[in-house]
Each structure stands twice: as C-alpha cells, then as structure tokens.
Amino acid sequence: MKDRIDTINKRIEEAASTCGRDPENVKLVAVGKTKPVEDIKEAALAGIDVVGENYIQEARTKFEALSSYEISWHFIGHLQSNKAKYAVKIFDLIHTVDSLKLAYEIDKQAKKIDKIQDILVQVNISMEESKSGITDIRELFDLLRTIGTMENISVKGLMTIPPYYNEPDKARPFFRELKKLAQKIVDDKITDEFSNISMDELSMGMTGDFEIAIEEGATLVRIGTAIFGTRL
C-alpha cells in the first residue's frame, strides 16, 4: 500500500507543479469506505493523515479503533440530519452540507459540545438527480448567508462530484464551474460579510480524474480505489 500512496502523492505533486500551483496546497483524502480498520491503519502507517468516510456507523467504529493515530477524519457521504450528533463528534470537516435543515442541526449539535464545526457546501454542478447537492445558485447564496449567522459552523469552501467519464478531461468543465462559483462568492463579498465563511477549500476529484481537478483548483482530492483497491 505504501507504494500506491507514494505514487498518488507523486502524481499530486506533478499535477500541481505543472500548472504552477504549490503541491502543499493540495491535500490527499484517503477514502476508506467499506474498508476494514486494518487497511486504514496500514494507510496511516504509510503516511496517510486524512481519511474520508461515507457512513456514520462505519466511521464510529474506525474512529474508536484508531483513536491513537494522528488522523483527521472527513465525512464525504450523504449526511442525514438525525446523524449530525455523531458526525460533529468525529469529523474535522464535513464535505456534504446541502440544506438549511442539515446546517441548523450541525450548528445545534456542535454547540452542545462547544465545537465550531468546519464544513463544505456540496454543489450539484451537473444537476444529476442521483447526486446530492445544491443545484440553484440563489439557494446556495441564501444558504451561505444564513449559515453566516450561525455561531458553531465555519464554511471552508465547496465540494462537488462530477458525472463519471472514461475520459477524465470531460470532467474539467464541472471542476472549472465550481472554482468560478467559489470566486463569485468571494466577489459578492459574502466572505467579507461573514467571518465564518471562506472559500479556501475546493473538494473535487477522485481516482479517475484528480489530476484534472488539481489543474482546475482542487485543494482536497478524495481517492479510494487507487489506494485501497476496488471496493468489495
């Protein structure tokens, strides 16, 4: 596994350097969905320090088993409001906030444990019915302005999942659009108006297209298969 991780890190570095970006500004999120604790432990020993999980119960088990490891846990799956109380106890960053209802619940649960929960807002750039995320730009801006009034949430940026293509370059327009959307949020002064909103992070790109995503501005790339192999 260490060889695979080293290869991914090298590809991240090369992709960033080629387009004039600092590789230090791109973080690898190792996606541990359905993989056992032993695999996550092996990855951590090989240098992985950010792990993304899709399911709350699975994450709770891994979090407890690996509490002695220096791992930052990210939630990258669809989060139901009734699971927010567990999410805020485990995750440093939640990538998939896409509704006011969920934001309110995260804020409420984070307040109970005196935590400011870092989140990303998920945007469904491709408008696919099968994917979660906000599709309406006005709804996105309204959501951000409302979250801006919450005391226990901090928005760090945006996240998207493009359609799957056999040709990675076909995903480029979706990554580019997310970057443009983040810039529009900055240009519209939302990040100036609210101290708990920034557009520092763009979570986009997976095993098949992460180099294209980096070229378009990704700061977090979510990679599972290239590290852990095909899911069962």
Image (tube, rainbow, N blue to C red):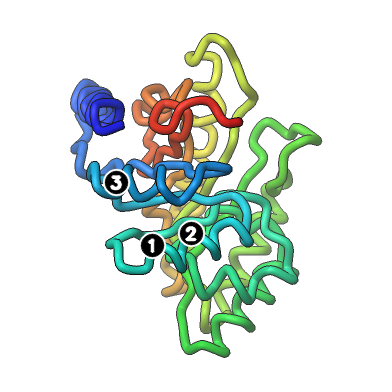
Write down the residue under mark 3. Answer: 48
Q: Quadrant of residue 28?
A: top left
Residue at 74% across, 71% down: 82
Q: Is residue 142 above or below residue 19?
A: below
Q: Which residue is mark 1?
A: 66
Mark 2 and mark 1 in contact? Answer it, CB < 8 Å.
yes
| Residue 199 relative to residue 146: left or right | left
Observer-nearest residue: 36 or 141?
A: 36
Name the kind of residue labelled 3 in the image.
Ile
- Mark nearest the camera among 1 and 3 is 1
Q: Secondary structure at mark 1?
A: loop
Rendered position, 108 above or below 212: below
> In the rendered structure, which disc, 1 or 3, sits on the residue that comes first in sequence?
3
Q: Which residue is mark 2?
A: 62
Pick the front one: 173 or 85: 85
Q: Secondary structure beneath disc 2?
A: helix
- For badge 2, the amino acid type reads Lys
Label 1 to label 3, Cα distance in Å? 13 Å
Q: Residue at x 36, y 51 (%)?
A: 50
Residue drawn 66% across and 63% down?
A: 143
Give residue 124's position: percent from left, percent from top: 67, 40
Q: Which mark is residue 5?
A: none
Pick out the residue farthest to the front: 38
Q: Is residue 40 visible?
A: yes
Q: Which of marks 2 and 3 precedes in the sequence?
A: 3
Tag 1 and tag 3, C-beta contact below 8 Å: no
Residue 189 seen from this side: no
Q: Position of residue 228 (x, y in %)?
A: 43, 32
Q: Residue at x 49, y 69 (%)?
A: 90
